[in-house]
Amino acid sequence: MNIVIRNLFRLSLAAVLLAGASLANADQVVVVHPGNPMTTISAKDLGRIYLGKARSFPDGGRVNPVNQESGSEARNSFYQEYTGMSDARVKSHWSKLMFSGKGNPPTEVAGDAAMKREVASDPSAIGYIDESSVDDSVKPVTVTR
């Protein structure tokens, strides 16, 4: 009986942790410059942009992806959600591209305020911030599956 109770407790704890992780990521939004006409982007296109596999928005306009700082929860959640990769794996991916001369990683900023300044100052920028940080300086974009 103790084993059953212990296993039920472990399963309950795992479910709570997974739900918490899902909720934490649900508050993150993708943002672009307010003058950018884009209103939606596919999760696949977003992942390709942030891995350097696409250098333009789906409509053909030049794109400049901007990252939260390495090791931040926002960055970890973003990459896990849209590329299925950990931050360490993404760093390895970019190291290979840089070594081969095929690209440079996205610009990196520290926090939502810096992300908003960067995106607001560059019509080709795309970034991600906490939903509570959205204001008129940036435009949220819907990510489709």
Image (cartoon, rainbow, N blue to C red):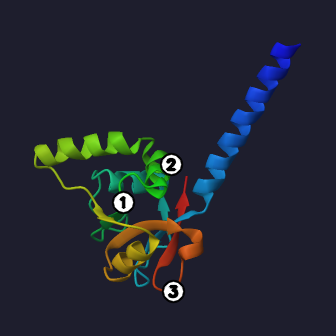
Of 89 and 122, nearer the camera is: 89
Point out residue 17 in the picture as x, y percentages from the top left corner.
67, 41
**Mark 2 secondary-structure assignment:** helix
Of 123 and 106, nearer the camera is: 106
Disc 1 versus disc 2: nearer the observer: 1
**Mark 1 secondary-structure assignment:** loop
Of 21 and 125, nearer the camera is: 21
Point out residue 115 in the picture as x, y percentages from the top left corner.
40, 72
Q: Residue at x 77, y 33 (%)?
A: 12
Q: Amino acid at mark 3?
A: Asp
| Label 1 Cα crowd, 10 Å radius (few <14 / some 14-19 / many 20+) | some
In three-dimensional space, the C-alpha distance between marks 2 and 3, rounded to whole angstroms, equals 26 Å
Residue bearing mark 2: 81
Closer to the N terminus: mark 2 or mark 3? 2
Point out residue 68 in the picture as x, y percentages from the top left corner.
39, 62
Closer to the N terminus: mark 1 or mark 3? 1
Indicate the quadrant where residue 54 lies: bottom left
Of the numbered discs in the image, which one, if any, rests on residue 141? none
Query: Furthest residue to the front?
Result: 2
| Label 3 Cα crowd, 10 Å radius (few <14 / some 14-19 / many 20+) | few
